[in-house]
Image (spheres, rainbow, N blue to C red):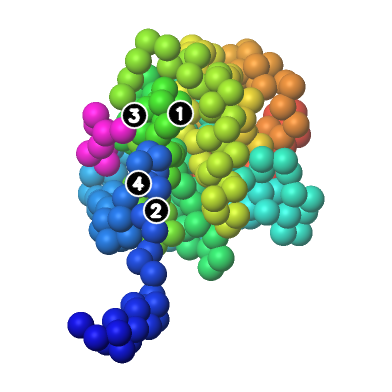
Amino acid sequence: MSVVEKTLRKIQEAKRPAAAAPAPGADGQVVSPAHADTRERPPVIAVDTVALREAGLIPPADEERRLSYQYRKIKRPLIANAIGRGASRMPMGYVIMLASALPGEGKSFTAVNLALSISKEKDLSVLLVDGDVAKPQLTRVLGLDGERGLLDVLRDPRLDVESVIRPTDVPKLSFLPAGVSSTDATELLASKRMEEVAILLGRRDGNRIVLFDTPPLVPTTESPVLAQVAGQIVVVVRAESTPQPVLLDALSLLEEHSSVSLILNQSLHMATSAYYYYGYGSKPDEGSEQA
């Protein structure tokens, strides 16, 4: 090869674009750009309305329209507090905890329907978290038993919470399963890692509302510790069912929290033609405002 040919080759090689440097993966290992583009994403969950209705998590078909109207009113002050729209923005207000004093008061029903209502907002998304780690009904109904979720993220700081969030076929609605159960669930929920995860969920997406479906307050230990990371707490009260002393005991567990609201559920005498009724109020002694 002549000196001229060698010179031309060097010039051509100098003009070639440099190869892209391998990028670090989520686990810190180096992966090539081609591999990074093809990494497996969590499969989409099909929200089975038949299964949800059979489990009592959404209303009968002939009640959907009326319930949809009620949830539009229920969600509005929660959203205002979460993002500062028409109200002062609450610290961690995008994390909303759904609680109840006892089992069977409609807490999970409220969580699901509130999530569906928020998903209809034009500029917001909603993440529904199964925080009832002892009895994860939402995880089971959605067919995600045994899948990685909240507890796994708390147990392993190397696991990115976004990697276990499952998109659904409902636009702007995603779901975080409870995860693999363990005997130290309360300690995991009370850990510094839980606080970090709650902050990350808002930092990664500033337009995301996070709804935690949690265990009943009185008979469990998980809900009171989850209240420490929630900006807003909504307590579901079943009309003509929840004993007042038990409700007061439940609220006493939240007395240090700055934002506790009530939803009155299944009140027949307040809505004569309806089975479900929801009220929204800020204090139990002020009653509930019709929604």
- Tell me the residue at 30%/55% (across/down): 32
Give residue 254's quadrant in the image: top right
Compare marks 1 and 3 and give the one earlier in the sequence: 1
Q: How crowded is mark 3: few (under 14 residues within 10 Å), some or many (20 or more)?
A: many
Q: Is residue 17 visible?
A: yes
Q: Position of residue 262 (x, y in %)?
A: 63, 35
Magenta stretch? 140-148
Residue at x 40% of width, y 48% of height: 24
Identity, as a three-letter code, of the amino acid under mark 4: Val
Q: Name the residue under label 2.
A: 23
What predominant SS class does the magenta segment belong to? loop
Determine which residue is flagged by label 1.
Answer: 157
Residue 260 drawn above or below residue 75 = above
What quarter of the picture does the N terminus occupy? bottom left
Viewer-side label of 4, 1: 4
- Let me know if residue 161 is in the magenta part: no
Q: Where is residue 242 in the image (x, y as percent from the top left)?
A: 53, 22
Q: Along the polypeptide, which appears first: circle 1 or circle 2? A: 2
Q: Identify residue type, mark 2.
A: Ala
* Kind of residue at disc 1: Pro
193 horizontally vs 104: left or right: right
User: Dot 1: few (<14), some (14–19), or many (≥20) neighbours within 10 Å?
Assistant: few
Picture coordinates of residue 129, whole percent (x, y): 44, 38
Give whichever of discs 4 and 3 has the lower sequence position. Answer: 4
Between marks 4 and 3 in the image, the one whose residue lies nearer the viewer: 4
Q: Mark 4 points at which residue?
A: 30
Label 4 Cα crowd, 10 Å radius (few <14 / some 14-19 / many 20+): some
Mark 1 to mark 3: distance in Å? 14 Å
**Residue 148 left/right relative to 24:** left
